[in-house]
Amino acid sequence: MSIIKKKLYAFIVLLVVAGFALPEIVRAQSERPIAIVKRFKPDVTLKNLEVDKYIELNLEENKGERLFNGDSLITDEEGFALVVFMDASVAKVKPSSLLILNGSVATASKAMNTRINLKNGEIFLNVEPQGGNDFEVATSRSLASVQGTDFGSRFDGFVWVEEGQVDVTALNSGQTVSLFEQMYAQVDEQGNSVESGTLTPEELNDLGEGYDEMENDLVQKEIILRFRDQNGQLREVRIDVFEESDN
């Protein structure tokens, strides 16, 4: 076989191998979860139209269901969900809520970027210190940027802080207000202005009602999530979660 034919043959083989390998790489990238549904009360549904995903979570089959970039989580009138992210941040999702998760997780480090698009309902978050990471909650009128705090957010642009700091931005005008402990912000419907102020202890307590449904008698456990990176190497992500004790 001539040198030219050998090179041509090698090139064709390379193309064939790449054709098989590329889907595996894409699949490996898409298999990196950004969070899990650690606990829930029915009915809770997961959707992702891009990958033809539709799951009505079942208490027996879907404990620890993984959430990926682009997934939507929907709770019905009685539904409740506790979502744990790869950096151990926690989102508590109230009934009648719809949120879309967007984010990325680095292959060999804890670096990750997370955005929750809150389309309906209300959530409360315990966000771990982010370092160089980004953690954001967006609605149709507001954007809340967080570096590590406990705060709540409603789809109508209302944000309140229990502890830490949250920067709230009106999407249309760009006006930004920094909130600290026991403060709130309300972005108007047009996304032009931000009203902020201080909450009384009673008001703060009222806003926190209902979020303790998933926190009774919890014990800390470590779980391990495994996925393959672009090179086909098996990777592990370890996160601490909390479960109800058997007592």
Image (spheres, rainbow, N blue to C red):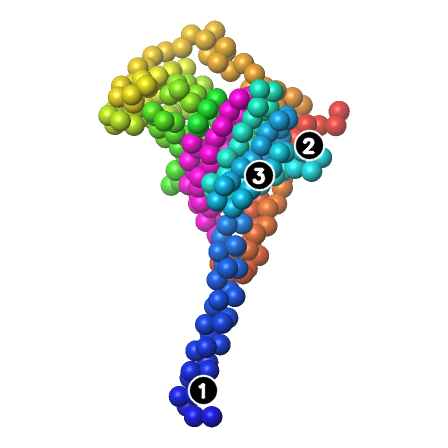
Residue 102 belongs to magenta span? yes
The image quadrant where one finds the C terminus is top right
Q: Is residue 26 above or below residue 204?
A: below
**Residue 210 point in image, percent of width and height:** 56, 16
Percent of width and height locating residue 146: 39, 30
Q: Secondary structure at mark 1?
A: helix
Do the residues under discs 3 and 2 have CB atoms within 8 angstroms?
no
Q: Is residue 163 visible?
A: no
SS class, disc 2? loop
- Relative placement, left or right, of 187 versus 201 is left
Q: Which residue is mark 1?
A: 6
Instruction: Using the numbered discs, state the Cα–Cα distance from disc 3 to disc 2 in whole angstroms.
Output: 16 Å
Q: CA distance from mark 3 to mark 1?
A: 49 Å
Which stretch is magenta? 88-117
Whether 242 is drawn above or below 239: the answer is: above
Mark closest to the chain's N terminus, 3 or 1: 1
When asked about the image quadrant of residue 74, the answer is: top right
Give the residue displayed 36% in from the left and 11% down from the top.
Answer: 198
- The amino acid type found where label 1 is placed reads Lys
Determine the image quadrant of residue 103.
top left
Circle 3 sits on which residue? 54
Between circles 3 and 2, the one closer to the viewer is: 3
Q: Earlier in the sequence, mark 1 or mark 2?
A: 1
The nearer-to-camera label among 3 and 1 is: 3
Farthest residue in the bottom direction? 1
Q: Which mark is residue 59?
A: 2
- Circle 3: element type: strand
